[in-house]
Image: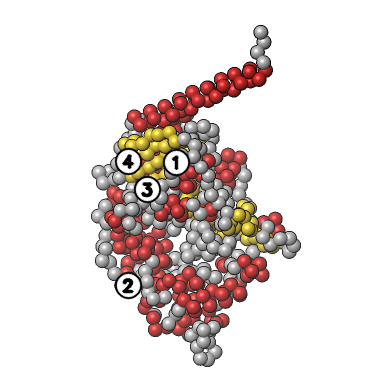
Amino acid sequence: MKQPRSTSRRAVAIGLLALAMAAQARAEDTCSALAARALPDATITVAEAIAPGQYPMPENPLTRLASFSGMNPAGRPAVGPNPAFCRVAATLRPSSDSDIKIEVWLPLNGWNGKLLGVGSFGWGGAMMYPAMLAGLEQGYATAATDTGHDSSTEEGKGGQFALGHPEKLIDYAWRADHLMTVHAKELIKAYYGKPASRAYWIGCSLGGLEGLIEARRFPDDYDGIVAGAPPNPLVKFNAAQLWPGWLLGRHRDVNMTKAKLEMVSKAALKACATPIGLKQGFIDDPQHCDFEPEQLQCKGTETADCLTAGQVELMKQLYRGPINPRTGEVIFPGVAKGNENLLGDFVDGQAFPVALDLFKYAAFQDPDWDWTTMDWDKTVNEAVNRLGPLLHVDSNLTAFFDRGAKLLLYVGWNDFHNGQELIDYYQSLLRDSGKAARASARLFLIPGMGHCYGGAGCDTFDKLAIIDNWVEHGVVPQRIVASKIEDGKVVRTRPLCAWPQVARYAGKGDIDNADSYACVEVTQ
């Protein structure tokens, strides 16, 4: 007797479900078996299958930071419940004083054959789990590290972990990232039975510097690197972070106030912003801003709307940045025009904590080091000599580019980190890394964006898709559409243009729509 068609379909569905459940069980068993995997100088502490939607996102300072849309590698305002994945955690001890934590997440289903390495931020000490999840949702195996210390402990706060621990400083500088990458690739091959076809790195701030260090030291680790706001060279960058507090603290008699800095910022915006930039609250191209503080100098008695001669001189030094008094070299550019209000926290002579830790703990190994006695020649050069070999990246990335790898650099113009330094590095890169660099490196200056994210500009774009399309399909990023997201909704889009081009309004159309802008080169 012939079975009814509905019964036949039901039997097929049950059979397919049984096959899927069996495949899922095999994937979970393969995941659990990774616990016994032997890795050099490493102990696997967790190898567990996580069901869809069942991963409780760990809370740490970097988790909160990575939840912002502008920090998301996939350029989305939020990430959803996790897909099923194999979570592997391990502790690496390449030295007797090392204690590096890594995690590698492997999709149970739908792996796209690729690896995403996720960078850290600031002094590290934790993992950016939302960034890992963003890659996982796209089918990537993802990996991250705490850079070799735990920022939730007293001794792991800021740069304190480096005090008396030279091996931990090496772990932080490059060893944790490289070993994380090596072990992630080994685990991928063990789990899927084949190696990753591509590997990408995405990070900003410290994560951007980590990407550059990877490209320089280990050019075979990654096929594409997205390095946002890399603080390179790190010692000079941090010297510049101390400069405003040091300078303003020495000239308290000039009475530079937060209100005055806000006034200067508004004047620079009015002088240099386009009509649209003025409306949206940022200068599109600060490097071509010809505003000078002398334009605000008081004609007579000082008022809230003008600068005294002493305040004008201070502003000129803040723009210029710290200078080596012996050589006249600008150590690192000062604040970009339009960002003067960012200096308000330093009017009473405060030190920037992250920068202070670099000199106290990492460079000079002295928690009592007095930064107010800083010698802008000897102090900076001594710190460069001590930390430069570990943490500075020169402009010779030839080995990285010669194998066809791609590098995307970006920084916000409303970052305390002046984008001019990254422009200078990019130009050196094109000069010193051969013809391949011109085809394989691009720089984007993002108007209105703060440090890695935020600000009035459009800070959210799909970094992961951009680097993947470039590496896999040869789609060179010349124009990227970025979004401004508020309350989970896109309120504005704007093109980001590969330097030296900038976005200019075409003269008609919605000013909040990227289609109304063209990328043009500005000469001045």
Q: Amino acid at mark 4?
A: Leu
Question: Which label sits on residue 372?
Answer: 2
Q: Amino acid at mark 3?
A: Asp
- In what element is the residue under mark 3? loop
Q: Amino acid at mark 2?
A: Thr
Dividing the image into 4 quarters, which one contains the C terminus?
bottom right
Q: Which residue is mark 3?
A: 146
Q: Is residue 430 left or right of residue 321?
A: right
Few, some or many C-alpha atoms within 10 Å of disc 1 (few <14, some 14-19, many ≥20)? Answer: some
Q: Nearer the viewer, mark 2 or mark 1?
A: 1
- In what element is the residue under mark 2? helix
Q: Position of residue 389 (x, y in %)?
A: 35, 53
- In what element is the residue under mark 1? loop
Which residue of the protein is positioned furthest toward the bottom in this rendering? 300
Q: Amino acid at mark 1?
A: Tyr
At 57% across and 44% down in the image, what residue appears? 465
Q: Which residue is mark 1?
A: 55
Let me know if residue 197 appears in the view: no
Q: Nearer the viewer, mark 4 or mark 2?
A: 4
Question: Which label sits on residue 92?
Answer: 4
Q: Nearer the viewer, residue 169 or 220?
A: 169
Q: Is residue 199 left or right of residue 365?
A: right
